[in-house]
Amino acid sequence: KQEVTQIPAALSVPEGENLVLNCSFTDSAIYNLQWFRQDPGKGLTSLLLIQSSQREQTSGRLNASLDKSSGRSTLYIAASQPGDSATYLCAVRASGTYKYIFGTGTRLKVLA
Amino acid sequence: NAGVTQTPKFQVLKTGQSMTLQCAQDMNHNSMYWYRQDPGMGLRLIYYSASEGTTDKGEVPNGYNVSRLNKREFSLRLESAAPSQTSVYFCASSVVGVGYGYTFGSGTRLTVV
C-alpha cells in the first residue's frame, strides 16, 4: 500500500532563506507526483507536476525534484517571502490507478 | 473562470440529517473525485468517478453515496449525518491519462452537531 510522508510537519524560516521541503513515498511504481499549496481555510492550488520519467520541474522560484528509485521528492523554494507561508502537500499517483495518495503536509511560516 | 465549483461552502447539520454536496467542473475533465480533509489525517479519498457512468469506492466510503450526474457534475450525499463526518470536503477533477494532475475546488466545510 502506497504511503506518503512529509517531514517536517512544520517549519519557520526568516524571509530570504532558501528552503527544502521533503516528501517520501513507499512504492516507486508511480505515474507522477504533484505538489500543492494550501492557504488556511482554502482549497489546494497545484504548484508543480512531475512525471515519473522526469527528474525535476521548475516554476519561478520553485523547483521540484523526483528520485523515483529512492522514493523521494523535494520542493525547493528560493528566496522565501512571507507570502509563501502556507501548507505544502505532495501527492503521488500510483501506477495503474486514477487516484492520488496525499501526505499530511508541511506547514511553512516565513517570518518578515 | 474555468475550474471546479463546490456548493455550499459551509454547512451545519444535525445528527441524522441528510444533505448533498455539489461539484461541477467546466474543463471537460473525465475523472472526478471526492476527498475529505481532517487535521493530522491528510486528504483521504471517499469516492471517485473515472469517467461518466462509473463510480468506485475510495479509502473511506462508509456513510456516503455519490452520483455522477453527467460529465460535468459529481455529487456526494450523506444519508444520515454523524459527528464523525465533520470535515472539509474537496472535489477534484482530472483529464484521463497519466500525464495529468488534479484541479481542486475550494471545499465545503461541514459541521455535524
Image: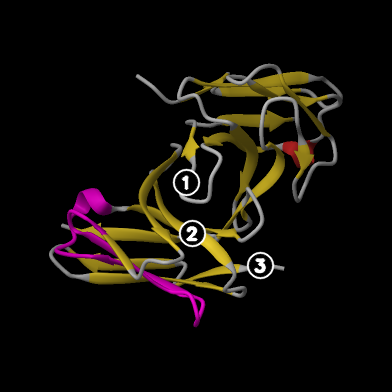
Q: Which residue in the structure is indicated by mark 2?
A: A32
Horizontally, residue A97 falls left or right of residue A54, namely right
Q: Position of residue A67 (x, y in %)?
A: 42, 76
Q: Position of residue B10 (x, y in %)?
A: 57, 23
Quick check: marks 1 and 2 in contact, CB under 8 Å?
yes
Instruction: Describe the element under mark 3 as helix, strand or loop.
Output: loop
Which mark, by number, is residue B101?
A: 1
Above or below A67: residue B17? above
Above or below A110: residue A22? below
In space, the residues marked 1 and 2 are separated at their CA atoms by 8 Å
Q: Which residue in the structure is indicated by mark 3?
A: A2
Residue plotted at (13% across, 65% down)? A16
Image quadrant assignment for residue B31: top right
Q: Which chain's residue wears label 3? A: A
Instruction: Describe the element under mark 1 as helix, strand or loop.
Output: loop
Q: Amino acid at mark 3?
A: Gln
